Image (cartoon, rainbow, N blue to C red):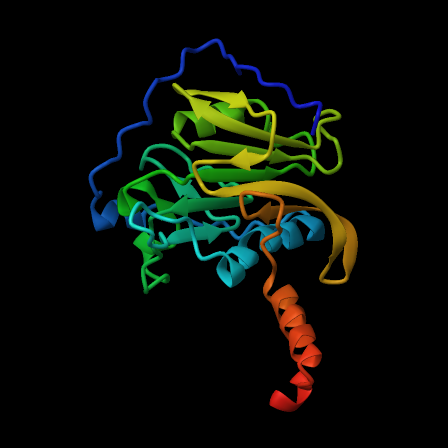
Amino acid sequence: MSDIMTKEVTSTEEPSTTPPPLLNPPSRLAVEGLVTEDDTPLDNLFSEKQQRLLTEPLYSSWPGPVGEAGERRPFLAAANVGLFSSLHQPPLVPDMFLSLDVTAPPNLWEKSHRSYFFWEYGKAPDVAIEVVSNRKGNEAGSKLKDYARLGIPYYVIYDPGRQLGETVLRVYELHVGKYQARTDYALPGVGLSLQLWEGTYEGVTDTWLRWCDGGSRLVPTGAERAVRLAAKLRELGVDPDQLV
């Protein structure tokens, strides 16, 4: 949006110029003592749908960014999952995060696999997104500093209710340990961008935050892909309902 201006976010404390060092894998006993989920419910139905709209299309329609050899790099996208950078710090729990070049382990029930432990994946996520529903989350204050401290390259604040001001969408990029607001919604290091999209998702018509392919083309949901395929088949004279 035009009201996003590039500026440096400052604080009274000088942040580190490098991401925090990753811990060596702690003992199984230490991990077993961590609270990885507290059964706290989601704050509202819109946020729940928005989280799914930010995760499901990536798995349905995005093959991942292109590597140097032309290969597709793996990724992990998740919603409302804790990010643990240390055994001794409480986790941050973004509404959604995206981490490139990592793969979820097969046994997700194992305690050491239930959350995003930095020492297990060997890196911080690449994107953290917060959806603002009230003024209690401090998304533009302490959380902004905390995500920068963890070395997450991109931090996104989506404020559909304008709880924090008139700016609905803010995209920050990490530069030498500090976040700077971008003048666009592109995430060049990820190969994606974001877009505010007015439309209907799961029966709800509203303004939604959506992924784009780095340009202006939306990354479609699985349902959207199915509708497009059905339309193509009908153009070819094939009734998709008869293929089931």
Report if residue 192 is visible in the image: yes
Q: Which residue is drawn at 61% across and 66% down?
A: 225
Viewport quadrant of the N terminus: top right
Query: Residue 200 in the image: x percent, y percent?
Result: 76, 57
Q: Residue furthest front?
A: 236
Out of 53 and 227, give the one closest to the viewer. 227
**Res. 190 image quadrant:** top left
Q: Which residue is drawn at 36% across and 62% down?
A: 109
Relative to 17, say whether 19 is above or below.
Answer: below
Q: How many labels does the image show?
A: 0
Q: Residue furthest right?
A: 205
Query: Residue 208 in the image: x percent, y percent?
Result: 70, 47
Q: Which residue is drawn at 49% across and 41% down?
A: 93
Relative to 109, say whether 22 is above or below.
Answer: above
Q: Which residue lies furthest to the top in this view?
A: 12
**Res. 177 image quadrant:** top left
Relative to 88, say whether 142 is above or below.
Answer: above
Query: Residue 143 in the image: x percent, y percent?
Result: 52, 28
Give the side of residue 147 with respect to residue 121, left or right: right
Out of 61 and 138, give the one closest to the viewer. 61
Out of 240 and 162, give the one closest to the viewer. 240
Q: Which residue is drawn at 56% across and 41% down?
A: 193
Relative to 238, say whether 217 is above or below.
Answer: above
